[in-house]
Image (spheres, helix red, strand yellow):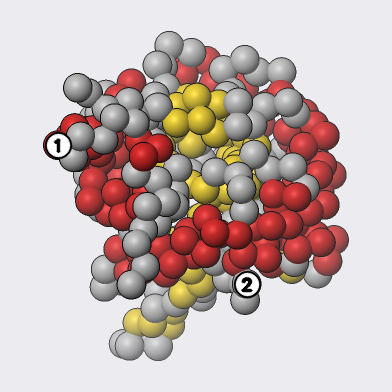
Amino acid sequence: MTADLSVRIGALRLKNPVLTASGTFGYGTEYADYADLSKLGGIVTKTVTLEPRDGNPMPRLAETPAGMLNSIGLANVGVERFIADKLPALEGLDAAVIVNVAGNTADEYGALTERVESCPRVDAVEVNVSCPNVEQGGLVFGTDPKTLARVVGKVRRATKKPIIVKLTPNVTDIAQMAKSAADAGADALSLINTLVGMAVDIETRRPLIGRTFGGLSGPAIKPVALAMVYKVFKAVSVPVIGIGGITDWKDAIEFLIAGAAAVQVGTWNFVDPGGAVKAALGIQDYCDRKNILAIGELVGTLVES
């Protein structure tokens, strides 16, 4: 018997637990020639802001051992062009569409969410709280529980769609941040976003990233991501979506066992544009071989020694 891979994220139903991670899959259509997107549970768009953004100065990417650094700076076309030009191309997609949003202030998060609330093709909103908070001198929204709760509250009041809050790992207590987001109205939590890192050119003695620091992603961060997913799974009752270093279906299975109800595939998309689809197919085969009837039977089954 074929296993049922469907997942519930609040009111959102995914056909399987594999999503693409924001910032690694464009607006969705860029990968349509390389993979059958209908095989995915859904896609998460690159971050959308109220106004267009050019992003950070070059260079924005640097390869590192077992990973990469990026400092894109949320470059995007802005919400109006996203709705007019990008969203219509996703109308026929047989997979969920989740829009990742970010703002400079809590009010911007609310206003942006209000704008996409009226779009039927948008199935859920993912809130990127790894952005500098201009109201508090550059403090990242996701590093202070009260500030995080204020942002999530603004988004919650602006939409009836499911809300996923994407947590930064660059905090002392990820469980505390998770509880704050859940208590403020998040339907699910996705983690982790990138770790802060840097790399140096020893010939020029300059950073390899234009803004010195970048976000580290890729296989190197998987152990950190797994640990944080497990901690958050035990701390909150809302679904957890695992992200970080997934490069094959076995990695995805690890996240599910650690408590993730779903996963997002990120950096692997740059190496293999069909990677996320391969992960979904691999999970199906694993569950069928193990006689797992529904994916929920696997989630959170880690046996501690």
Q: CA distance from mark 2 to mark 1?
A: 38 Å
Q: Secondary structure at mark 1?
A: helix
Closest to the observer: 100 or 74?
100
Residue 57: percent from left, percent from top: 53, 61
Q: Residue 170's spot in the image, x, y percent?
A: 57, 71
Picture disc at residue 173? 2
Disc 1 residue type (three-letter): Arg
Q: Quadrant of the C terminus?
A: bottom left
Q: Amino acid at mark 2?
A: Asp
* Residue in the image at 37% along x and 48% along y: 256
Q: Is residue 29 above or below residue 66?
A: above
Residue 63: name its quadrant.
bottom left
Foreground mark, 2 or 1, reads 1
Q: Are marks 2 and 1 in contact (CB under 8 Å)?
A: no
- Left or right relative to 209: residue 267: left
Residue beneath disc 1: 289
- Residue 133: percent from left, percent from top: 76, 60
Question: Residue shown at 29%/49% (left/top)?
Answer: 253
Q: Is residue 263 visible?
A: no
Residue 14 x %, y %: 45, 27
